[in-house]
Image: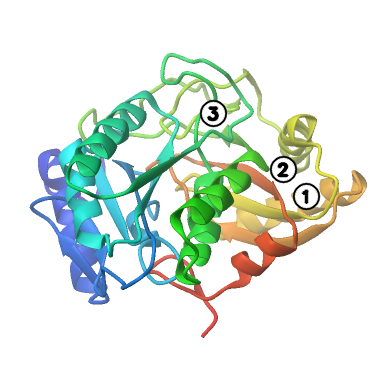
């Protein structure tokens, strides 16, 4: 195992200490594993709280800041945070306008956020929840009931975060978040397995010269394995898989996401093929984001997420955002 770490047991805390040093605009509570906007709570505004296992950076801590999340709760690598983290985060960011939990559809996340919502409500915090389940590759796996939550998490957090920043009430922010999720679909491809610090070896076997179509962000199995394909062939397969389910009638937001070990040179080349497929299918692209945003440690591969965008969603997408990993405007 060759990793830039000390010991597996401290990898999350070490990363949080480094994040705190790099981003003084955040409050990073290493002991309790909560990342907050330094100006939280923001008076009169709904607060978005999300979280999940570490190893998917910059999701979620890298998306904390004005225009996006108010707080994030990192768990151990590929392990859900615990309810106490979520309750602590909700209490720290609640201004009285309520808190929206953004939850990826994985069993541990769903159960722990549900418990946290009950505990937070017992403390007088108004809670709403939105479940992100955008992955079209598989349904009802060993890890989820229904579809997995993947790249659309970024769209939900950005667009709902912009709605909250405008001062929309909790029910409106929740409705926008649900609309984004309902209009979003994703499909991922792995060119290599990832390696968790605790295991020290690949989490699954992917023979040389093969790839996995429909991989999950924890290395969960996809639809099938095939001999290595070209960027063009992968784009045809992945985009068509999304469009078979989404069937947009208007322009889309496109996220071409790296799984952690895929360089931008390859991702931009893959984006060119994604744009080609969408043009051939008559789907206009309103906005495109390319980079490593929802990752899987050191996995080589990519995912495509499309969101059917209307005028309001585009306006909220374009609204200013200032986080460690996503920033524009102002």
Residue 25, by quadrant, is bottom left
Instruction: Give whichever of discs 1 and 3 has the lower sequence position.
Output: 3
Say which of 67 and 176 sits in front: 176
Nearer to the camera, 316 or 188: 316
Labelled disc at residue 215: 3
The residue sitting at 52% across, 64% down in the picture is: 163
Tell me whether the residue at label 1 lies in contact with that at label 2, contact meaning CB atoms closer than 8 angstroms.
yes
Q: Secondary structure at mark 2?
A: helix
Which residue: 47% across, 67% down? 326
Percent x, y of residue 123 = 17, 46
Q: Residues within 10 Å of mark 3 (few under 14, many from 20)?
A: many
* Disc 1 from disc 2: Cα separation: 7 Å
Left or right? Give the position of 126 relative to 248. left
Q: Which residue is mark 2?
A: 231
Which residue is under mark 1?
273
Asked if residue 292 can be seen in this view, the reply is no
Using the image, tell me which numbered label, if any, was put on residue 89: none
Q: Residues within 10 Å of mark 1 (few under 14, many from 20)?
A: some
Q: Earlier in the sequence, mark 3 or mark 2?
A: 3
Which residue shows up at 75% across the image and 39% down it? 239
| Residue 225 drawn at (x, y percent) | 61, 19
Locate residue 93: give its quadrant. bottom left
Q: Residue at the location (76% across, 62% down)?
A: 286
- Give how far across and how far down residue 206 sits, in percent: 49, 23
User: Position of 38 compared to 219: left or right?
Assistant: left
Between 249 and 239, the one nearer to me in the picture:
249
Q: Cα distance, mark 1 to mark 3?
A: 20 Å
Q: Residues within 10 Å of mark 2 (few under 14, many from 20)?
A: some
Image: 190 above or below 89: above
Mark 1 secondary-structure assignment: helix
- For the N terminus, the image quarter is top left
């Amino acid at each position: 195992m060759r990793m830039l770490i000390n010991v597996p047991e401290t990898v999350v805390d070490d990363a949080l200490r480094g994040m705190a040093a790099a981003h003084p605009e955040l409050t990073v509570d290493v002991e309790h594993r909560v990342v907050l906007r330094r100006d939280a709570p923001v008076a009169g505004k709904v607060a978005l709280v999300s979280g999940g296992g570490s190893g998917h950076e910059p999701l979620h801590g890298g998306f904390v800041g004005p225009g996006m999340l108010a707080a994030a709760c990192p768990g151990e690598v590929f392990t859900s945070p615990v309810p106490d983290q979520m309750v602590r985060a909700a209490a720290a960011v609640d201004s009285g306008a309520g808190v929206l939990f953004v939850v990826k559809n994985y069993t541990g996340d769903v159960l722990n956020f549900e418990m946290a919502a009950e505990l937070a409500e017992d403390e007088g915090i108004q809670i709403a929840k939105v479940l992100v389940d955008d992955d079209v590759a598989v349904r009802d796996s060993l890890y989820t009931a229904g579809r997995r939550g993947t790249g659309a998490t970024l769209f939900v957090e950005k667009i709902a975060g912009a709605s909250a920043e405008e001062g929309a009430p909790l029910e409106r922010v929740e409705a926008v978040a649900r609309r984004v999720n309902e209009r979003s679909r994703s499909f991922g491809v792995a060119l290599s397995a990832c390696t968790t610090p605790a295991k020290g070896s690949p989490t699954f076997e992917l023979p040389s010269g093969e790839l996995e179509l429909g991989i999950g962000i924890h290395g969960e199995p996809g639809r099938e394995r095939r001999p290595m394909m070209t960027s063009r062939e992968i784009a045809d397969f992945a985009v068509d898989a999304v469009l078979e389910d989404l069937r947009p009638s208007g322009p889309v937001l496109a996220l071409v996401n790296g799984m952690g070990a895929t360089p931008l040179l390859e991702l931009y080349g893959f984006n060119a093929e994604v744009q080609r497929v969408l043009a051939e299918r008559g789907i206009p692209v309103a906005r495109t984001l390319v980079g490593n945003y929802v990752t899987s440690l050191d996995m080589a591969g990519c995912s495509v997420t499309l969101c059917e965008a209307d005028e309001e969603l585009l306006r909220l997408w374009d609204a200013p955002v200032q986080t460690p990993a996503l920033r524009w405007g102002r």
